[in-house]
Structures are given as C-alpha cells and as structure tokens.
Amino acid sequence: MSISLKVNGTVRTLDVPPEMPLLWALRDELDLKGTKYGCGVSQCGACTVHVNGVATRSCQTQVGTAVGKDIITIEGLSPDGMHAVQKAWEELDVPQCGYCQAGQMMAAAALLATKPKPTDADIDTAMNRNLCRCATYLRIRQAIHRAADIKGGAATSAAGSSKPGSTDQR
Amino acid sequence: MTTTEQTPGVTRRDFLRVSALVGGGLMLASYAEPLEAIERLGPLSAAADPTLSAYVRITPDGVVTIIGKNPEIGQGIKTMLPMLIAEEMDADWATVKVEQGDLDSTKYQAQIAGGSTATPTNWLPMRRVGAAARAMLVAAAAKQWNVPASELTTAKGVVTHAASKRTASYGSLATLAATMPAPDLATVPLKDPKRFTLIGTRVKTVDLRNIITGKPMFGIDVMVPNMHYATFLKCPVYAGKVQSANLDEIRKLPGVTHAFVVDGGTQLTGLLGGVAIVGTSWWRIQQARKQLKVTWNEGATATQSSAGFAAKAAEFAAGKPQRSLRKDGDVDAALASAAKVIKADYVYPFISHAPLEPQNCTAHFKDGKCEIWAPSQTPDAGRSLVANTLGIKPDQITVHLIRAGGGFGRRLNNDYMVEAAWIAKEAGVPVKLLWTREDDIQHDFYRPGGFHYFTGGLDASGKLIAFKDHFVSFGEGERFAPSADMGPTEFPAKFVPHLAFDASVMPLGVPTGALRAPRSNALSFAIQGFIDELAHAAGKDPMQFRIDLLNSELPSAPAPAGPGGAPPQAGFDAARMRGVLEQLREVSGWGKKTLPKGTGMGVAFYFSHRGYFAEVVQATVSKAGAITVDKIWAVGDVGSEIINPNHAEQQVQGAAMDGLSQAYGQEITFTAGRADQSNFNNYPLLRMNKAAPIEVHWRKTDFPPTGIGEPALPPVIPALINAIFMATGKRVRSIPLSKVDLRWS
C-alpha cells in the first residue's frame, strides 16, 4: 500500500502496510538510521521522534496514523546540526556509546520547545522515559540547561571545568 | 618517561615498517609478530594495496590520519589510543582524522575491548608509534635543510629550525620521511610526561558530530548491497534443539524469503539451535515470527530454576564445603577463641548486560569467503568461532569493527556473529541479523548469581582475627562456570591471620560470562558488606576499620595460583588503597557531618583490573523505604596519568550509576531453564530521576597508567548498602533492593 509521509519537511512515498511502525519505515524504508530500536515496547525512548512537534515513540506509532503529520527525526532536527540541543550536547560531550542520544536529544528539544527554562524536576519528569544504559544522565541534565541558555542567547559555557572533583554535579 | 618501562602483559617485540603512500606520503605500521612472519608477507607496498591501513598516514596535503585499532563500545578508546600516537608525534589534534581499523591482528596486535586492558597494554606501544613517526619527520627535515636533527623542534604538525627560522609542515615532509630509516621501536625516545600537551587534557569524542546528527554508525545501521534481514528464534531453554517447525507456512508470509532450521551445537558460546527467518524487511519477518510454531527438545537445562539454585545453596550451606580455595592459620580455632563471632549470609542474583543496542551482525558469505560487520568486543575470537563453525579458514574472513551501542562485557561473546555468518551462508544472501530486545535479555551470558556464608571473629580489642567464607556458586568439580569464580587472593586474604575461603558448586546450564568488572561487581557487595558488619560489631568507624585492616598485611607468602591455575591478580598494593581511602575521607567529609536519621554515609573499596577505587555514598531512605542517593564521592588511583579526563570521568560516572542500577532493581530469574524477564518493563534499568551527583577525584601515583572502564563499579554497591545501614539500621544482605523492605520508623 502506498503511503505518503512528510519527514523532515519532505514528502516521501513508501509501499508498506499502514500498521508498520514508523520506526521501521524511517529506518529500513527511508534509510533514516538515526532513530534507534531499543525495546520495541515504548520503554527506552531510543526511537523518539517529533510528530507535529510532540516527542513520540516511533516504535508504537503506526505509519498509517502519521500520514499528513509533520515528522521530524534527528536528521531533520536542524538543517546543519546546530540546534541548541546539538550544540549543548557537543559542548558537554554528552554521549558515551551514543546509541540512545538521538532519542534523548529529540525528547530534550521537545521539552525546551514547551519549557524554555526547565528545572531539574522538569527535566527528570520529561526525560525519565529515555534510558541511557551508559548512564550519561548527569551530562544530559547539564546539557539541557545549557541548551536552554543557548536558546536564550547566553554565550558562555558552564561546562568544561577540569578542576578536580567538580564534575557533573546536579 | 624512560624507555625501559615495562608494559604489563606486553612481552613481544614491536617492529615498525614504513612505506610510501600512493601519491606521496608516509605510512607507519607497527608489528608485534616476529620479523620472519612479516617477511613472509612479502614487501609491504602501498601501491599494491592502496586501501591498506596502518596506524598513521600523512598525505602531502597535510592530513594526518590515525587509526584507532580497538573496538569502540562507548568507552572512548577510538579517541584515546590515537591521542597516545598524536601526543608523541606532536600532531595537531584539531586537524587529525581518526579512522577505525578493521580486524587485522598482524598489523594491530590485540583488538579487544575487555578487562580494562587497553590502557596498560597500549600506553607504551602507541606512544612509540607516534614517536617513531615524529623521528622520521624530523629526520626528513634535517636532511632537507642539512641541519642536525637535534636542532629541530616539533609542535602541532610543524617542524621548526629556530636558528634559521625555517618551518615545514608534516604534510610537506611526509614523502621524504617515508624514505628515512625507521627507528627501533624499543629504543625510540619518548616524551617526558611533563611535556605532554594532549595527554591529560579534556579531549572530546572523535565521533561526536556524527552521533549528535544521527549518522549511521552502529552495527544496526550497516547496509550492504542486496542485504536481507534475519531474525533467529532460539530455544528458550539454553542449548535446546528444534524438533519441528511450521516452516512451509512461514515461507509463504509477506516479506519472507527464507526460513530454515539451524541445528546448532551444545557449546553455549557457539551456534545454538533455532529457526532463522530471512526476508526483505526486519519488521515483516517479525510479523512472520509471530506465526512461527516450534516444537523444541528442551534438554536437561529445563529442570533448572532460581528456586532450585537457592534450595541447593541452602543445602550446601548446611554441609561441609566441597573444596578449599585458601586456608591460612587455623580459622576454626581462632573463631572458638574470638571475643565476638559474627555470621551473615549474602546473596546476589543473575543479571543481564542489556546494552541498549540489541545484538546484531551483518554477514555476507560468497565463494567460500565471509565478510562480516560486527559490533564485537572480541572480533578476533569471533572470527575464529565463525571459521570453526563454518569450516573455513580465518584468513577467508574479513571483519569490520563497527561501533557498538554499549558493551559491558556482553559483546565479549560472539554468538550473534556466528549466527549471522551461518544464516548468510545458508540463505546465500547478505543478511543483517538483528535480535529483538527479548532475544537479548533472554539469551545473555549472564553475570552469575552467588551465595556467601560468612563467619568473622574479632578479638577483645575489635581486631579482625578470623574470616571464613563458604562461597556457593556454579560449575562442576574444580571448574567454576564463567565469571562464577572467586580467587584465593580476594581481600581480606593476606590481611587476616586465620582465614578460609571454601567453595561448593552446583551444575549450571545457563550461559554466564563477564559483566563490567566481572566477579568483582558481585564479590564486592558481599565482602565489603560483611566487612562493614565486622566494623560495626567491633565498635569501630567503618572507614578507620578498613584502613586499619589494610595496615595489617601479613608477611608475604608465595601467592597461590588463581582458579584453574591462572596467575594471581597482579599485586594488590595496600599502600595505594590506603592512600585512596585517606583521600576519600578528606573529600567526602567523612565523620565530620551530622546527618539526620534516615540519611547515612557508607564506604567501600575495591581493587580490580589494576585499579584502586574507594567510594562513599550518602543516601537518604524515607520512612516508606524509598532510597535517594544524595551524593557519591569516588577516588581512584589508576597510575600516573589520566589520559583523557573527560572520558575517564564519564567512565567513573557510568560505572557508579551502573552499580546503582544493579543494586536497585536488576535481577534475572529462571523457571524451567529459561529467563523470566524479557524487556525493560520487568528488567528495570536506572533512569534519570535516580541518577546521583558524583564527584570524581584522582590520586595520581608513580605507577604506569591502567584502565578505567571497570574498576570504579565494584565499590558503589556495598557503599550504598553500608549507607542504608547508617540511615536505617537495616543491614541489606541480598540485592536487588526492590525486593528488600527498607521501611523504618
């Protein structure tokens, strides 16, 4: 069955059953590999994309229900990889293995779109559905605050401290 | 740094070969093989093989490319090993390109991500490669300018002759440098560490941009022409076999191109029995898999269960141990005369690695040759397994090392690799095998559970005089199951005059293996927990009790062999551990704080993988029994240099959180020979709201640098347990904590 999806601003047509999860349509039909499979049951958040601006689990979203909606993946988060979240992630060198980070960044970008200055509690609530097996949580939390500052126009980084014992505190 | 410094575990001599690059330039490779073996390969010619990779390539346009040889699993090794080369080369790190090397044990020696070994085994060899490259570039400049090499200096990819104010970029010198005699790697001078400009600085992940923009880079992302997708359903009972399956029905389903039975063998680390489905879309073959009906011959393991293991352990505990692992003095006599005797039983569960990227591998078998793209921690061992199973020679197999979405020891085994290769061969098409999350959790090489029955004796002054552990584990006869062992040098051996380590093992059909800080991650909980009990029974401060114990080392006796005749772990140095504990006491404010009831601080230390770590956890337990870790202080001694503090801190944070995650809720149980858990809903991992602030401190000592991926994990679990005791008076002797009632009033 022919289905048209608007992904990262471009309409793409694919021949898949409408019940195929958006995750697999993105990865294996449209070759957008940034969105990851981790659990398939909405537990880990590695597959998070934006559907009409809302952080959405693509493993639980059938492509048929995404027709006509605006789908954004990590590849389309910014035209040049310079979204405030990406800049903050780069400044703080957040990833370890990196596998969950696309999902983390999509969730973080959606949070900042609705809460430009999130508190730690806001971050914990919004990000608690995204697993990081390497446990980069402290840097994720720090990077979200930093991204909020970047969006708000702050120039200097709070990160990069190398004095002993001062790393990654809440 | 002197050139006579020995790297642990490296005894082979390194040989350097140099060749010109096509279009000019320099290529350096270091070989660990005897020279004759290299000569047999014939002349190394870049012209004959323009894709041939080595450690360093410098092209005339000035691009310096350094190869990262080891598997990258998130530990930052693809950044760190090239840093060692770049440091000694004086390359300009900002412009250095780093490439992942394929599997080539002739060029690259060991390519392993395991045992925190990369730092101690590569600290000198990688630096020597860089120093050799620099020496040749300097020699080229000296020749070009007709000046003594001793008058030349290097920095950021440029050679300078200060007297004549001449400079030349590495790129401009590369072609001439390739004709210079290669220095002897054993004697090439290395920098004095005081002159390091890159080592010791906070360097970012080389692939950071690709990660944050979602570029395909993991095993799951691999695409090759005509690639098909594969799913593999194994018997839920380990090493069970397929009796029959409705393959004819499955083959008719949409998207399915092949469906077949894999007989498999009986080795848990090898190819096991199951049904493979191959098709044009992974999601479609998952739909087909739901229609699969298999009758299994489950085999003997179907009689095993967690309840059975616990019952057997209780039976062992009541009887005489099967064998002795270590016996010092007369522990029973000492206990009989002790002023105070404390007994306690500790138990920990099986746990799964659960890296976030499920196991996967892409393989293409054609004309007797196999090409493999594998996110493996031990690609060389994987190649041997594939060769043996498929009946081809290792040199018929090409292995590309692909970034892994986490390792934690899971990918030390290569079951997914041999499955992909076998299925690709059977199907006759390239396949990407991808496991489901359920496959991953239910077919792991689990961290084995274990049981410890401790007895400790204190004299009237509160000194520990007798220590006895009856360790109940898994295995057969003298052999422990993988990672289910305990060594005779385990602390407090050699620090208590009367000590006995005994063991009893029961048979196990469940696969087990190394998980980040294998053995230590479990033993630390039990032993450092019990030591805390002894400290409290002695009426001593738990920090001081540990330091006193570390001060009571007995006169040295010949170290007994490890399990199976393995050498004992390289020398535990009590002074280094005391130093770490003393620094930890300072930075954590131990003993100087007044904490409210419900909040407590706990301490533990552990030596593993050559690293000395001690940690303090401050935890608050609500009256309802909910735990919050307020803060963790970690102090580590891994030698003279923290090569990349940025990643080293990440490893300590990750290891500590990993430990918290294990303590809080990780447990795999077995019923009728199969895992009861299947996904993150019933196998919970730590989430953001439980991530605890952590301070990381380094105690730098004059020892050669050692690894950091593992040793920070073991202390955190007992430190948490000990903090919970201080907060609530409740002594936790079994994990996970999700099963322990911590309510207090």
Image (cartoon, coloured by chain):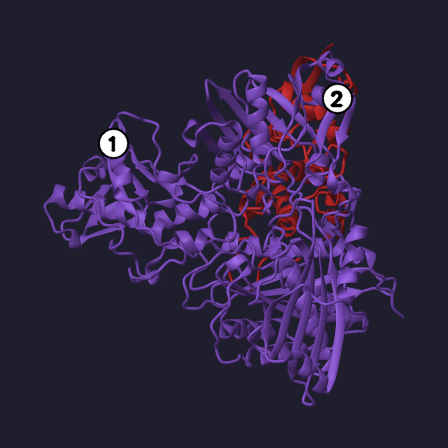
Amino acid type at mark 1: Gly
The residue to which callout 2 is attached is B245
Q: Is residue B284 above or below residue B700?
A: above
The mark total stands at 2
**Chain in red on the image:** A
The residues bearing labels 2 and 1 have C-alpha atoms spaced at a distance of 52 Å
Q: Chain of mark 2?
A: B
Cβ–Cβ below 8 Å for labels 2 and 1? no
Badge number at residue B42: 1
Relative placement, left or right, of B92 versus B512 is left
Residue B90 seen in this snapshot: no
Residue with the most extreme right position: B745
Give whichever of discs 2 and 1 has the lower sequence position. Answer: 1
Q: Quadrant of the C terminus of chain B?
A: bottom right
Q: Are marks 2 and 1 on the same chain?
A: yes
Disc 2 crowd rating (10 Å Cα; few below 14, some 14-19, many 20+) is: some
Q: Position of residue B216 (x, y in %)?
A: 55, 29
